[in-house]
Image (cartoon, grey):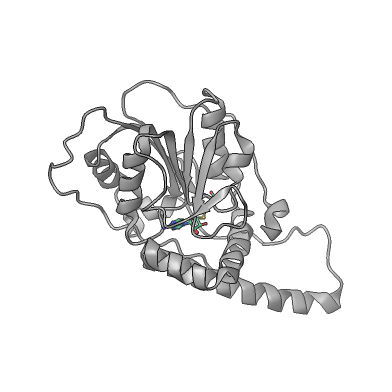
Amino acid sequence: MKEQGKRKRKRGRQRHPQNQQSKTITKHGKQTLQHQPSTSATSKPPKSSTFLDKMRARLSGGHFRMLNEKLYTCTGKEALDYFTENPALFDMYHSGYQEQMSHWPELPVNKIAEWLNGRSPSLVVADFGCGDAHLAKIVKNKVFSFDLISNDPSVIACDMSNTSLDSSSVDVAVFCLSLMGTDFPSYLQEAHRVLKPKLLIAEVKSRFDPNTGGADPKDFSRAVCDLGFASELTDFSNKMFILLYFKKKEKHDSESKEIEWPELKPCLYKRR
Ligand code: SAH
């Protein structure tokens, strides 16, 4: 992606316990998507370019917000058709996404890489909604990277509710800020199909804040468990995102009760 170089990627040192019990790291403050000033104050561009730059940024910011809202309000199949018809919109979305992420003090993809790098590199990973496939580039594992459009030979283009992976063929499934479509349960169902043991989810914190219309993380976790997983760790410690770690249950009665999925509200970004 064009703006990849600008992305700030910090690598924290936090480790997660490995035991089987479900644990919760307590919340240290509310997530806000209120944004810091968008450029560093150190170097001022010449006046003539400032106006044009501002107009350009405003236009692309507007496009990003429109595409972001689209992704949160349609199914994966609709999103796939939409971007396949016009792949340039996908690039536009990702430029805006990188811009938004450059304001986050820590990126969830780095926390996930940290988790993987603390384990055997022989674990096979599926990165559902990989974006620019950054995860595959910063871990030693074999990573199958999936997204709606492939701008990189390592990315497999598809709607992630329907991947080309064999059943029980991967060790870790990752969803990093990618449970976007209205049919997100079908993405998790697909992860359950292709997985042997581990499911890692990082999502925007405000989507799981019941005080502001978000889902109750317990309801979400329960639904994932009903799919055939056991919760291992829920980490609320980051200001911007939550991390959920699950383990696939060895035996699961797939004919059991219908799963009640909570609604996950879209994460709409404010104009900067
Ligand atoms: N995981 C990456 C990118 C997150 S942005 C990171 O952490 O940087 C969310 C990504 O999910 C986008 O690239 C979007 O195209 C992808 N996505 C959303 N719905 C999808 C679907 N149904 N199938 C495949 N990819 C999807």
Foreground pick, 46 / 72: 72
Q: Is residue 19 visible?
A: yes
Looking at the image, the residue that sits furthest to the right is 46
Residue 198 lies in quadrant: top left
| Residue 272 visible in the current orientation | no
Q: Nearer the viewer, residue 26 or 77?
A: 77
Give the left or right position of residue 230, taking residue 145 as reference.
Answer: left
188 sits to left or right of 119: left
**Residue at screen point 52% across, 70% down:** 65
Q: Residue at x 57, y 28 (%)?
A: 117
Residue 233 image offset from top left, x and y in percent: 37, 32
Q: Position of residue 91 (x, y in %)?
A: 61, 65
| Residue in the picture at 44% in, 64% down | 80
Q: Quadrant of the N terminus?
A: bottom right
Q: How many marks?
A: 0
Indicate whether 236 appears above or below 67.
above
Does 104 appear above or below 248?
A: below
> Could you say where residue 237 lies in the image, as x and y percent from the top left?
47, 38
Q: Residue furthest top?
A: 19
Q: Quadrant of residue 52?
A: bottom right
The spot of residue 77 in percent (x, y) is 38, 64
Q: Residue 70 lies in what quarter of the image?
A: bottom left
- Which quadrant would the C terminus be assigned to in this image? bottom right
179 left or right of 119 in image: left
